[in-house]
Amino acid sequence: MSFTLIQEILEGKHEGKRVAIRGWIYRKRESKKTIFLLIRDATGIMQVTVKQGTQPWREAEKITIESSTTISGTVKKDKRAPGGYELSVDSISIIGLADTFPIAKDLSEEFLRDIRHLWLRSRKMNLVMRIRSQVLWFTHEFFRKNGFIEISPPMFITSACEGGATLFSAKYFDQELYLTQSAQLYSEILIYSLQKVYTCAPSFRAEKSRTIRHLTEYWHVEPEWAFADMNDVMHVEEEYVSYVCHKIAKQHSQELKELGVDPEKMLKIEPPFPRITYNEAIGRLQRKDWARY
C-alpha cells in the first residue's frame, strides 16, 4: 500500500481523492454519531471523521491516544477542520494499541522532564526538533559557502583546552582520558593546512550546575581560520547569526508562528550588530545591580 504524507494533504494536493495515511492518534473526540480523530505523522496533523454504522466505527471506538494506525478514506475540504482538510474514513487498521496516555492537564516542567520520552511526541517538541535540525543544516551551509572545511576531531582528548577543573575523566583501556571541551586545539593545528575550518559537534564541561543555564553537554559551533583578527571574528559571527535567522524565518515561518515566534522579528536581524569595547562592558556591569540575578 502507498501512503500519503499529511503535509501533502494539507497543501491541497489530494482533494477529492482516496488516500491512505499512517501515524499516531493525537486527539480523540466522540459524539453519538461521529468520532473525530486527529492523526499525526512527522509532517503534520489532520482530522479524520468516522460515521456511526460504517465498518471502521468499532475500531475508532477502541483506538486510544498515541495508538499507531493506518487510515484510508476520501480527502474533503472543510474550513472547520484543523488545516482546512479532513479525511472521511472508510478503513482503520490499528497497528499498536496504546495504554492510557499520561500527559493530560499536568504540564509542569518537572513532570514533563520525568516523561521526556513521551513529551517528545508533542507538537511543540516536534517543531522544536525540526527547527533545530534546520539550524544545523543552515550552519553547515553558511560555513561551506564561505570556504570553510568541516573537520571531525576526536571526542576523547588527553589534555584540557579550557581549564582542568571542568574536565570529564573517562577510563580508556589502561589510560585516563577526557571528554572534549572544544575542538580548538585540533582546529588551530589544521588551519596551517586547510586555512579555514569549522566543527559542529558536542562538547562537555564538568561545571557544577548552580543554575538551569549550566549545561554539562552542548553542541558547539567552532570556526577557526588563519590571518584573522578580532574584527574578522565578529564579522563572521554577525553574518552567521543573520544568515541562519533569515533562512529559518523565510523557509519555516509557519513552524515559528506555531511556536509563538514572530518570523518578521528574525528578518530584522541584520549585520553589523552594535559593538562596545571590553572596558565599556565592564563599566556597564559595574553600574548594574547584579546581586538580584
Image: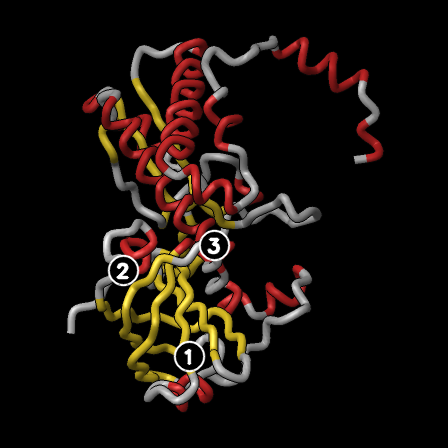
Say what amino acid the circle numbered 2 marks: Leu
Judged left or right of residue 261, residue 292 is: right
Say what amino acid the circle numbered 3 marks: Ser
Mark 2 vs mark 1, foreground winner is 2
Q: Visible in this render: residue 87?
A: yes
Residue 292 horizontal/vertical position (percent): 84, 34
Front residue of 119 and 145 = 119
Judged left or right of residue 130, residue 108 is: right
* Residue at 55% across, 80% down: 31
Front residue of 24 and 178 = 24
Residue 193 horizontal/vertical position (percent): 19, 23
Kindly indicate whether the residue at mark 1 contacts the one at mark 3 (C-beta within 8 angstroms).
Answer: no
Mark 2 vs mark 3, foreground winner is 2
In the displayed structure, 260 sits above or below 225; it is below
Say what amino acid the circle numbered 1 marks: Ser
Give the number of marks. 3
According to the picture, the residue beneath numbered tag 3 turns out to be: 169
SS at mark 1?
loop
Disc 2 to disc 3, how far (Cα)?
46 Å
According to the picture, the residue beneath numbered tag 1 turns out to be: 67
**How are the residues colored?**
secondary structure
Q: Which mark is residue 234?
A: none
In the displayed structure, 58 sits above or below 83; it is below
Residue 126 horizontal/vertical position (percent): 44, 56
Which one is earlier in the sequence, the residue at label 2 or at label 1?
2
Which one is earlier in the sequence, the residue at label 2 or at label 3?
2
Are there few (<14), some (14-19), or many (20+) residues within 10 Å of tag 2? some
In the displayed structure, 152 sits above or below 116; it is above
According to the picture, the residue beneath numbered tag 2 turns out to be: 5
Disc 2 to disc 1, how far (Cα)?
18 Å
